[in-house]
Amino acid sequence: MMNIHAPSSPKLNLVRLPHGAGLDLPAYETAGAAGMDLRAAVEDDMPLTIATGRRALVPTGFIFEIPEGFEAQVRPRSGLAFKNGITCLNTPGTIDSDYRGEVKVLLINLGDEDFVISRGMRIAQMVIAPVTQARVAEITETSTTARGAGGFGSTGL
Ligand SMILES: O=c1ccn([C@H]2C[C@H](O)[C@@H](COP(=O)(O)OP(=O)(O)OP(=O)(O)O)O2)c(=O)[nH]1
């Protein structure tokens, strides 16, 4: 598909697994899309039904090599969420750059009806984002600020 990304964009290597045979590669569906859609690698003759209130780990059929310094965030698709109550339970799912297993999507059905996932259905989207790893240091006292410990609505409505 089209995309606006420069040649210097991070490169995402994918390895297709046997059950991913024939599936479209994850792709940006419009020129300015932030996320690439992920497809369900369920068997053709065995669609997956997620009963209302239940969850399922849905295979994508690919191993991703997320470039170092980046992560992938697996997020729900708003259409599925709005129309069917289907969302990612652990949103945003985190795909680490050192993960070499199959990317899977943890869906939950919060809708009123059972939901059937067929092979190739676009079930979620994945955003590639830069990551910073902090250097953790234990100290005995924090610096002082105007906010202090105020939070959770302390500034009013
Ligand atoms: O929606 C998701 C979330 C995670 N993963 C994979 C990639 C990620 O790198 C790995 C570990 O995820 P996470 O760190 O969220 O899991 P954990 O529960 O902390 O397990 P672990 O101890 O394996 O890190 O699982 C997915 O395929 N899909």
Image: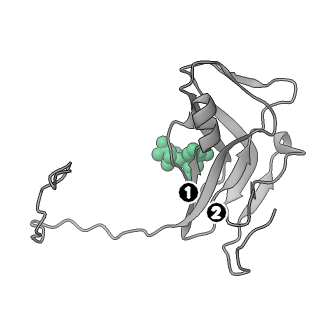
Mark 1 residue's CB less than 8 Å from ligand 1: yes
Foreground residue, 22 or 138? 22
Point 11% across, 62% down: residue: 148
Q: Which residue lies under the disc numbered 1? A: 96
From the viewer's perspective, is 3 left or right of 129? Answer: right
Identify the mark nearer the N-term, 1 or 2. Answer: 2
From the viewer's perspective, is 13 left or right of 84? Answer: right
Residue 41 placed where, x, y %?
78, 38
Task: Report the Cα–Cα distance between label 1 and label 2.
Answer: 7 Å
Instruction: Give the residue furthest to the right.
Output: 22
From the viewer's perspective, is 87 left or right of 132? Answer: right
Q: Is residue 7 above or below residue 105?
A: below
Give the residue type that dot 2 points to.
Ile
Crowding at mark 1 (Cα within 10 Å: few <14, some 14-19, many 20+): some
Res. 1 image quadrant: bottom right
Does dot 1 land on a helix, a strand or a loop? loop
Res. 72 image quadrant: bottom right
Foreground residue, 110 or 12? 110
Q: Is residue 22 above or below residue 130?
A: above
Point 58% across, 69% down: residue: 68
Pointers 1 and 2 in contact (C-beta within 8 Å): yes
Crowding at mark 2 (Cα within 10 Å: few <14, some 14-19, many 20+): many
Q: Which residue lies under the disc numbered 2? A: 66
